C-alpha cells in the first residue's frame, strides 16, 4: 500500500502534500462551481445580451463620433423626457464591459414617485433603441453573482462559505507550489494516454501557466470581503451593528470617494446648464479622446448642481479620475483628495478581480485563465481518485470514499456545465411572458445539475462519464441551433451583420460542444491507460537527484 | 498591432524555453541538442521574455496593465506550445523559424511605425 503520510508529519513536502490533497478534496466542488460561474462572469454583459435575444441595431463605431456631440444628444433626450430631474447620467459607449456601441441614458425625476428614465441611445442619431421583446432573464449577471452569493441561501452564509473556500484555495496554491515544485522542470510536458501521469501533467500544466492569475484572483477575492471576514477588527474600532458598519464604510469610502464630495443638496436657485462642449474639450486635452466612461449631472437645473465626468473604469485608478464642474458656471471644483491607502488598495484589487483594466483582449485572457483554473481544479479532483485507484492491487474493491468521490466528480465536473447549458436552453424555451421567468431559468440549472448528480450515482461507472460528456456536447452544440429557431440573433444573421458579440456567444457554445464531444470520443476509444506504480509517482514528484 | 506582436513573441519565448530542455528538443528535431544550442535557446527565451513584456506594455494602456497582459498572453502561449509538443511535435520544426521571422517582422514594423 501507499506510504502516504497523514497529517503534518515527515518532511515539509510530505506535510504540504497532505495539506494540498485534503484542502483540495474538501473544497474542490465549491471551488469548481465558483470558477465555472465566475469565469462566465467575465462575459456577463455579452451573455445577458444574447439571453435577451433581441437584435441590437448596427451602430457606428463610437470612436468616430465626437464625445461632446454624443453628450449633446443624450442631454437633448433627457431635457425632453425628464426636464425636472435630480440626476441625469450617461454611460458612454466606451465604458468597459459595455462594448455594444450604445449609450445608456438615465434620469431620476424630482418627483420621487415617478418612474426612472433608463434607455439605450444610438450615439450617432440620438434616437432611443427599442429593446421591446427582450426576454426577462437573469442573464450573465445571475451566473456571475452566483459565484459569490451561491444560490438558495442567505448572502451571509454564502459569503462565509465562499470565504472559506477561497482561503483553502490560497492554501492549496501555496502548498501546491511546494508539492509540485518539479513542475517548473517539466513545464511544457503533457504526456497523454498515460493514466495518472497524464492527469498529473495536466494538473501541473494548467496550474503553472495560470499561476499569476490564480494568486491574483484568489487574493483579491478575499480582499473584496475583507471587512466581513474579519469582523472583529471592525467591531473593535467601530462597535457592532448595522450603524457601526455604515460608519466604517462612510469613513473609508465617502471622504476619499465621491459620495460626500457630490454637491447633492440643491441650493434652490434655478440655473441653466452651461455648454458642456468646452469642458469636454478640456477633458479630452488632458485624458485623450475616448476616455470618458460616465457623464453625470446632479441637480441639473439648480445653481448648486454639479457635472461629474468619470474616466473609463478600465483605465481609472480608484476615484481619483473624476472631474467636477459647477452646472451654472462650469467652474472646476478641485478635489482635496485625502490619501486613504486602504481604500485605494481595495479599489485596485477589486478592479483587478473584475477584469476592469484593459480592453476586450484582456478579458479574453482572463476568460482563458479562468478556464485553466477550472481545469486545474477538475484535474486535481480527478487525480485524487485516479491515484487511489491505481494504488489498489488488482481487483480489490475500492473504499466507499473513493467510489463516492469518483461519482461525485463526474456529476460535478460535467454535470455543472450541463446545468449551465440547460440554463441557456431554458432561456429560449420558457415562454416569454411567464411569471418568474428569470427564476425558472436558474431553477432549471439546478434541477439539471441535480439530475446529473443522481445519474452519476446510479449508472454503471464506465458509462457515467461517457453519457454525461455526450449530453454536454449535444446541449452546447445544440444551443446555436435552438437559437436559430427562437430568435433573430442566430449565426445566419449575426455573422453577415458583423454582430460579433452574439455570434461570439454561439461560436463559443459550438467550441464547448466540440470540446465535450472530443472528450467523449477519447473516453470511448480508450485502451487501458498504462498503470503506474507508486514508485513511479514518487519519482515524478521528487526533485531530480 | 502590438497585441499581435506580443502574442507572436510570447509563443517564441515559451518555445525557446521548451527547446532549451533536451527532451523537448529531441521531440521536435529528433536529435540531441548540444550544450551550445541549449544555451542559445535559453538565452533566446530570456530575451524573448523581455521583448514580450515590452510588446505587452505597448499593447496596454499603462505598464501595470501591461504586466498583467504579459502574464495572460504567456499562459495562452504556454498552453499552445504544450499541446503542440504533445500532439504535433514535428510541426514545430516549421513553426519555429516561421514564427521567429514573423515576430521579427512585427517588432521591426512596430519599431518603424511606432
Image (cartoon, grey):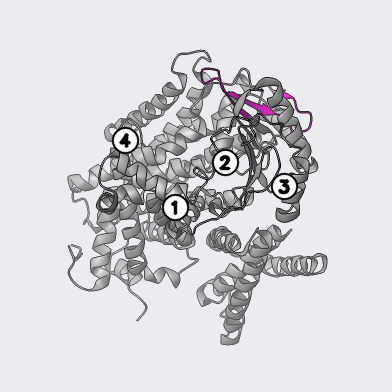
* Residue appearing at x 32%, y 73% in the figure: A542
Q: Which of marks 1 and 4 is nearer the N terminus?
A: 1
* Residue appearing at x 70%, y 58% in the figure: B4
Q: How far apart are marks 3 and 4 (CA)?
A: 52 Å
The residue at which mark 2 appears reads as: A511
Camera-side residue of A466 and A409: A409
Categorize mark 3 by other alpha carbons within 10 Å: few (<14), some (14-19), many (20+).
some
The residue at which mark 1 appears reads as: A373
Chain bearing tag 2 is: A
Chain bearing tag 3 is: A
Categorize mark 1 by other alpha carbons within 10 Å: few (<14), some (14-19), many (20+).
many
Are the residues under badges 2 and 1 in a single subunit?
yes
**Residue B111 as seen in the image, left or right of residue B30:** right
Give residue A290's mark.
3
Q: Earlier in the sequence, mark 2 or mark 3?
A: 3
Which residues, given as a range, are shown in magenta?
Answer: A106-128
Q: Earlier in the sequence, mark 3 or mark 1?
A: 3
Mark 2 against mark 1, which lies toward the viewer?
Answer: 1
Categorize mark 4 by other alpha carbons within 10 Å: few (<14), some (14-19), many (20+).
many
x then y, percent, for residue A543: 35, 76
Q: Which residue is at the far bottom? A: B36
Q: Earlier in the sequence, mark 4 or mark 2?
A: 4
Q: Earlier in the sequence, mark 3 or mark 4?
A: 3
Chain bearing tag 4 is: A
Q: Distance between the residues labelled 4 and 2?
A: 24 Å
Amino acid at each position: 500500500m501507499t506510504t502516504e503520510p497523514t497529517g503534518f508529519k515527515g518532511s515539509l513536502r510530505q506535510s504540504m502534500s497532505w495539506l494540498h490533497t485534503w484542502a483540495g478534496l474538501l473544497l474542490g466542488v465549491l471551488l469548481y462551481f465558483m470558477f465555472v460561474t465566475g469565469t462566465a462572469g467575465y462575459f456577463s454583459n455579452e451573455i445577458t445580451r444574447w439571453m435577451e435575444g433581441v437584435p441590437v441595431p448596427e451602430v457606428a463605431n463610437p470612436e468616430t463620433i465626437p464625445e461632446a456631440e454624443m453628450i449633446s444628444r443624450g442631454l437633448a433626450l433627457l431635457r425632453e423626457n425628464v426636464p425636472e430631474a435630480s440626476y441625469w447620467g450617461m454611460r458612454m459607449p466606451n465604458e468597459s464591459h459595455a462594448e455594444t456601441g450604445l449609450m445608456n441614458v438615465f434620469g431620476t425625476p424630482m418627483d420621487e414617485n415617478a418612474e426612472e428614465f433608463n434607455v439605450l441611445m444610438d450615439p450617432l442619431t440620438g434616437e432611443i433603441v427599442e429593446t421591446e421583446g427582450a426576454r426577462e432573464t437573469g442573464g450573465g449577471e445571475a451566473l456571475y453573482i452566483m459565484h459569490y452569493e451561491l444560490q438558495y441561501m442567505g448572502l451571509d452564509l454564502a459569503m462565509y462559505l465562499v470565504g472559506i473556500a477561497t482561503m483553502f484555495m490560497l492554501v492549496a496554491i501555496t502548498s501546491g507550489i511546494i508539492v509540485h515544485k518539479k513542475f517548473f522542470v517539466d513545464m511544457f510536458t503533457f504526456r497523454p494516454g498515460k493514466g495518472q501521469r497524464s492527469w498529473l501533467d495536466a494538473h501541473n500544466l494548467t496550474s503553472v501557466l495560470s499561476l499569476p492569475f490564480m494568486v491574483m484572483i484568489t487574493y483579491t477575492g478575499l480582499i473584496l470581503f475583507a471587512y466581513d471576514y474579519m469582523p472583529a477588527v471592525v467591531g473593535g474600532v467601530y462597535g457592532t451593528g448595522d450603524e457601526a458598519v455604515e460608519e466604517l464604510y462612510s469613513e473609508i469610502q465617502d471622504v476619499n470617494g465621491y459620495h460626500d464630495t457630490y454637491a447633492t443638496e440643491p441650493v434652490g436657485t434655478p440655473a441653466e446648464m452651461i455648454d458642456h462642449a468646452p469642458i469636454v474639450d478640456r477633458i479630452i486635452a488632458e485624458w485623450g479622446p475616448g476616455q470618458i466612461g460616465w457623464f453625470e449631472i446632479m441637480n441639473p437645473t439648480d445653481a448648486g448642481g454639479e457635472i461629474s465626468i468619470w474616466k473609463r473604469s478600465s483605465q481609472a485608478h480608484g476615484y481619483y479620475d473624476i472631474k467636477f464642474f459647477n452646472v451654472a458656471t462650469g467652474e472646476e471644483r478641485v478635489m482635496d483628495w485625502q490619501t486613504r491607502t486602504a481604500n485605494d488598495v481595495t479599489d485596485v484589487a477589486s478592479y483587478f478581480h473584475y477584469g476592469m483594466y484593459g480592453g476586450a483582449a484582456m478579458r479574453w485572457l482572463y476568460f482563458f485563465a479562468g478556464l485553466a483554473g477550472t481545469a486545474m481544479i477538475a484535474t486535481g479532483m480527478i487525480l485524487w481518485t485516479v491515484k487511489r485507484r491505481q494504488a489498489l492491487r488488482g481487483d480489490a474493491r475500492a473504499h466507499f470514499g473513493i467510489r463516492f468521490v469518483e461519482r461525485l466528480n463526474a456529476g460535478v465536473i460535467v454535470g455543472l456545465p450541463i446545468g449551465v447549458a440547460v440554463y441557456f436552453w431554458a432561456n429560449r424555451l420558457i415562454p416569454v411572458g411567464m411569471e418568474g421567468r428569470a427564476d425558472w431559468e436558474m431553477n432549471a440549472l439546478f434541477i439539471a445539475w441535480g439530475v446529473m448528480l443522481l445519474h452519476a450515482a446510479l449508472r454503471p461507472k464506465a458509462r457515467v462519464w461517457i453519457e454525461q460528456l455526450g449530453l454536454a456536447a449535444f446541449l452546447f452544440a445544440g444551443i446555436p441551433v435552438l437559437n436559430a429557431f427562437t430568435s433573430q440573433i442566430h449565426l445566419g444573421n449575426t455573422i453577415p451583420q458583423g454582430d460579433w458579440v452574439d455570434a461570439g456567444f454561439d461560436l463559443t457554445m459550438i467550441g464547448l460542444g466540440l470540446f465535450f464531444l472530443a472528450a467523449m470520443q477519447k473516453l470511448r476509444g480508450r485502451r487501458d491507460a498504462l498503470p503506474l506504480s507508486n514508485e513511479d509517482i514518487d519519482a515524478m514528484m521528487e526533485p531530480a537527484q | 498591432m502590438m497585441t499581435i506582436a506580443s502574442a507572436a513573441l510570447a509563443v517564441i519565448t515559451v518555445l525557446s524555453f521548451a527547446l532549451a530542455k533536451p527532451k523537448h528538443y529531441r521531440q521536435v528535431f529528433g536529435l540531441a541538442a548540444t550544450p551550445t544550442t541549449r544555451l542559445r535557446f535559453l538565452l533566446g527565451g530570456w530575451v524573448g521574455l523581455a521583448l514580450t513584456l515590452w510588446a505587452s506594455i505597448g499593447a496596454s494602456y499603462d505598464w501595470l496593465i501591461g504586466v498583467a497582459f504579459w502574464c495572460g498572453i504567456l499562459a495562452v502561449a504556454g498552453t499552445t506550445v504544450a499541446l503542440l509538443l504533445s500532439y504535433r511535435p514535428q510541426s514545430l520544426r516549421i513553426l519555429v523559424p516561421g514564427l521567429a521571422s514573423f515576430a521579427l517582422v512585427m517588432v521591426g514594423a512596430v519599431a518603424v511605425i511606432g
